[in-house]
Image (cartoon, grey):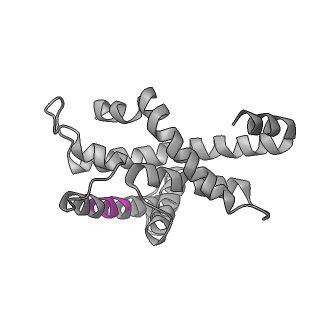
Amino acid sequence: MRGAMLGLVHPAAIRASLLPEIDAFMRSHLDGWSGCIVDVQAKTKEMTLLSALNQIAGITPGPLSDTLKTELYTLVLGTISLPINLLGTRYYQGLQARKKLVSMLEQMITERRSSIQAHDDMLDALLRSGDDGAREKLSDEQIIDLIITLIYSGYETMSTTSMMAVKYLSDHPRALQDLRRAS
């Protein structure tokens, strides 16, 4: 599994493929903020999650991303709660959300395997990993665990970093001007 992940996120792949795609996605998402008062923390979390879903599985904003977002938010709340597995607790709800996420990802994998269309995303790369014989093929369960791990681990860290960058740039307009000139 480690080899499959390193093949997807090594520095050259990040520079050549991921960063330009993430930049384009973020710019299009930020355009919707123009002229509005926004909750930066909530919007950066949403934007980061939508970007991750797009990069990992080609999921665009819509009903599917809304459902995945709801389940992921519930999973996150469940993981930071007391681990009491009783009906109605956040922990229990988090476990149920993970089951729903697994079910949705299983359905996506089944659809991808039956489709002849090639997708240029991480899910497609994970499904093809091992086809060359260089490493062992990943099971669907391993692929699902990797996807949930990627989304979950990147969700909090990237959204917090993005939020702090937005705050810093709004507090320091000169730094924002310098960035605009540089790009």
Say left or right for 160 vs 138: right
**Residue 130 versus residue 66 in the image, above or below:** above
| Main secondary structure along the magenta-highlighted residues | helix
Q: Quadrant of the C terminus?
A: top right
Q: Is residue 88 left or right of residue 45?
A: left
Residue drawn at (75%, 61%) of the image: 34
* Magenta stretch: includes residue 105: yes
Q: Nearer the viewer, residue 68 or 11?
A: 11
Image side of residue 50 versus residue 87, left or right = right
Residue beneath the point at 45% across and 48% down: 151
- What residue is rendered at 32% in x and 53% in y? 119
Residue at 22%, 44% in the rendered image? 128
Outermost residue to the left = 133
How many discs mark residues in the rendered view? 0
67 above or below 26?
A: below
Q: Quadrant of the N terminus?
A: top left
Q: Is residue 58 visible?
A: yes
Residue 93: % across, % down: 46, 64
Question: 165 or 31, which lies in front?
Answer: 31
Image: magenta residue range:
101-106
Residue 81 in view = no
The reply to whether the magenta stretch includes residue 154 is no
Residue 131 location (% of width, % of height): 16, 39
What is the x, y in percent for residue 90? 51, 61
Q: Position of residue 60 (x, y in %)?
A: 47, 62
Whether residue 46 is situated above or below residue 20 in the rendered picture? below
For this orientation, the residue located farthest to the bottom is: 63
